Image (spheres, rainbow, N blue to C red):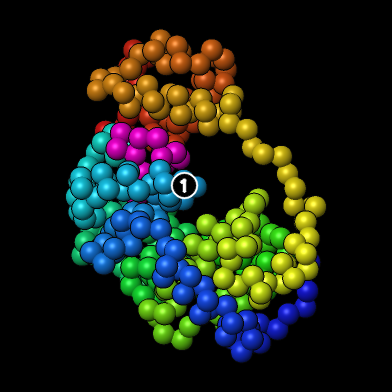
């Protein structure tokens, strides 16, 4: 359990000593990502946030460039077929995100005049958009003053403020949100810079398994570092395997379907995985998710 803590004291204490150093570090060390350029549109920021869910940024950047070249506005994507969208998503993983992104584009076209909404309360209504994505788009595309909490931010706050190696819970608590709110600079643009800066610090320096504390601009303010970086034994868990999982099977099935411009036979799908029961279960799940369309005579295709 985190120690007793008064979030109202954060602004006067931690806020004054960590916000400036972190944003200063970010000004020098920030990664050069295409959606961070001045010419990036709110739609481009929206796409980057959806693509970056559970996918490393290094894999997202080239896919984002190709995607924005093909579908530079929500209207363009909304007019695409599901099959086109799934093929373009390629190997980013979790292809349902591609369909939800297309669904969101259609809602933006139909309900918001083709413009990405700027307010959190509007963004959260879009298909596939949760708390983090809505807050991130509001902050990074529109300089709205909102709390942006992802895994990296929560880990930095857990260490610096609470002295814990990792957040104590799987989802953000009221206390974490209160602390994050108190740390936000008072104006929207500065708050947005702080949010992306602390997120970058977590991604590049304050990493989960091997933090580079010697490179951290707020090492001297970190409660966890001052305590000798105590391990959180209860946090330890086995690394998730990929080989042989349903995720792997679904990926192989999708690869066969993406590679063909014509319906694929059941025999072609059988050839990609030897376990009939697991393969058929995964195929059924892809059909249920709307990622695969069954046709007569035992054929399958991407949805049209």
Magenta portion: prevailing SS class = helix
204 in relation to 253, above or below: below
Q: Which residues are magenta?
A: 87-102
**Numbered-mark total:** 1
Mark 1, residues whose alpha carbon is within 10 Å: few (<14), some, or many (≥20)?
Answer: few
- Along the viewing direction, whichever of 304 and 27 lies nearer the viewer: 27
Membership of 91 in magenta stretch? yes
Q: Position of residue 81 (x, y in %)?
A: 24, 38
- Along the viewing direction, whichever of 278 and 256 lies nearer the viewer: 256
Of helix, strand and loop, which one carries label 1? Answer: loop
Membership of 154 in magenta stretch? no
Residue at the front extreme, as displayed: 214
Q: Position of residue 48 (x, y in %)?
A: 36, 54
Which image quadrant: the N terminus? Answer: bottom right
Q: Position of residue 232 (x, y in %)?
A: 77, 56
User: Which residue lies under the disc numbered 1?
Assistant: 56
- Along the viewing direction, whichever of 120 and 298 lies nearer the viewer: 120
242 in relation to 109, above or below: above
Residue under the image location 38 percent in, 79 percent down:
189
Name the side, left or right, on which 1 lies relative to 62. Answer: right
- The image quadrant of residue 192 is bottom left
């Amino acid at each position: 359990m985190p120690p007793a803590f008064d979030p109202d004291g954060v602004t006067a204490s931690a806020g004054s000593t960590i916000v400036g150093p972190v944003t200063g570090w970010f000004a020098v060390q920030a990664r050069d990502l295409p959606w961070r350029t001045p010419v990036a549109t709110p739609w481009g920021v929206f796409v980057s946030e959806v693509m970056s869910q559970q996918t490393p940024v290094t894999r997202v950047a080239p896919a984002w460039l190709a995607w924005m070249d093909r579908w530079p506005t929500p209207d363009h994507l909304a007019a695409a077929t599901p099959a086109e969208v799934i093929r373009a998503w390629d190997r980013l993983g979790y292809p349902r995100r591609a369909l939800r992104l297309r669904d969101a584009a259609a809602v933006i076209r139909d309900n918001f005049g083709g413009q990405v909404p700027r307010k959190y309360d509007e963004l959260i209504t879009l298909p596939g958009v949760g708390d983090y994505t809505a807050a991130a788009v509001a902050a990074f595309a529109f300089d709205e003053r909102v709390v942006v909490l992802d895994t990296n931010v929560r880990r930095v706050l857990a260490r610096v403020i609470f002295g814990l190696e990792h957040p104590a819970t799987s989802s953000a608590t009221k206390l974490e949100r209160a602390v994050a709110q108190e740390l936000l600079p008072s104006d929207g643009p500065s708050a947005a810079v702080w949010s992306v800066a602390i997120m970058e610090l977590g991604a590049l320096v304050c990493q989960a398994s091997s933090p580079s504390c010697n490179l951290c601009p707020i090492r001297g303010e970190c409660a966890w570092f001052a305590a000798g970086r105590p391990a959180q034994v209860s946090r330890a868990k086995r690394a998730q395997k990929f080989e042989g999982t349903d995720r792997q099977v679904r990926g192989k099935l999708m690869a066969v379907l993406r590679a063909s411009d014509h319906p694929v036979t059941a025999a072609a799908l059988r050839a990609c995985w030897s376990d009939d029961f697991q393969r058929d279960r995964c195929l059924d799940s892809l059909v249920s998710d709307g990622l695969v369309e069954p046709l007569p005579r035992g054929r399958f295709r991407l949805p049209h």
